[in-house]
Image (cartoon, grey):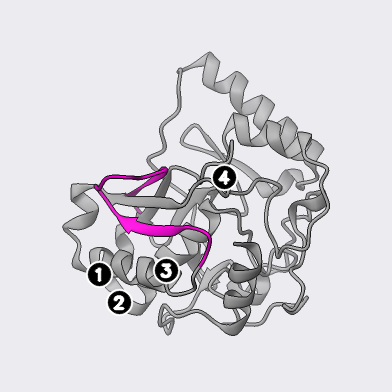
Amino acid sequence: MFKRAAVLAVSCGVLLTGCGKDVEQENQEIVSNLVKAGFPSDDVTVVDGAVYVGGDAHVTLEASREMLQSGKESQEQYRTTNLVSSTKTKICVTPTAAFANISLFSTGLNQAISRYNALGLTFQLALGPTTGCSATITAQTTTGVGGSSGFPSGGNPYGAINIGTGLTSYSQGVSTHVIMHEIGHTIGFRHSDYYNRAISCGGTASNEGTAGVGAVLINGTPATATVGGSVMNSCFRSSETGTWTGTDITALTTLY
């Protein structure tokens, strides 16, 4: 997620196994799998040795393979084919020391957790480190303005959200909004305006692609996006308050 009308290159601290040629070969397979799954090739980027779609969603090798294997129909909103298993009832979000030391981020994470939990979903988020976690997401800092994360794999949420330290020049509402957005990706949500990122980002219209069943609309939510209409819009505004819209609540409660 990036500031509206100012989309910046992603620079994230993601962990990959292997190095050099092994990583290059893995990334070639990931890119190939994503194109086969239906993502436009110009929406797939490789930054700092990691593959991203939609500007801020990291895709692992395992997740890209799962996208090819899934052929199930669903009624869910704009999401990938990968979801979090119903066995993951307590998802712990654990901040790094650097993340926790930024008050806007620490408060934003607590607010994000409370706002997800208030919806009575099939899982509860908990501030880590703590016990009884069935899955864990690390909240960490990165450079730039905005954030990045990734999609679920193997029934688990993506394991990290990366929040840019450039957000410290914005309000508490913006930090909370971006954290909520990136957690949304970790549990399988795509951008609400995936079909035309210019709606929230400005500039030239661009389509992330439907990726087959990877961008399916939830019953009861609008088929078109509007500026400020969803936490899951591609880009954020400086006026964001970090609260759910009615569309967001319908999407979340239908999916989980």
Q: Amino acid at mark 3?
A: Asn
Classed neighbour count for the residue bearing mark 1: other residues with Cα under 10 Å, few (<14), some (14–19), many (≥20):
some
Cα separation between marks 4 and 2: 27 Å
Q: Which residues are magenta?
A: 121-143
Classed neighbour count for the residue bearing mark 2: other residues with Cα under 10 Å, few (<14), some (14–19), many (≥20):
some
Residue at the disc numbered 1: 107
Label at residue 172? 2
Of the two numbered discs 4 and 1 on the same chain, state the one appearing first in sequence: 1
Cα separation between marks 3 and 4: 19 Å
* Local secondary structure at mark 1: helix
Task: Report if residue 176 is visible in the image.
Answer: yes
* Mark 3 in CB contact with mark 4 (< 8 angstroms): no
* Local secondary structure at mark 4: loop
Q: Amino acid at mark 2?
A: Gln
Q: Where 159 sits versus 28, above or below?
A: below
Taking the spot 80% from the left edge, 45% from the top edge, the residue there is 38
Q: Amino acid at mark 4?
A: Pro
The percent coordinates of residue 179 (x first, y second) are 40, 63
Of the two numbered discs 4 and 2 on the same chain, state the one appearing first in sequence: 4
Label at residue 117? 3
| Quarter of the view holding residue 131 | top left
The percent coordinates of residue 122 (x first, y second) are 53, 60
Quick check: 254 left or right of 41?
A: left
Q: Nearer the viewer, residue 102 or 28?
A: 102
Of the two numbered discs 3 and 1 on the same chain, state the one appearing first in sequence: 1
Task: Report if residue 56 is visible in the image.
Answer: no
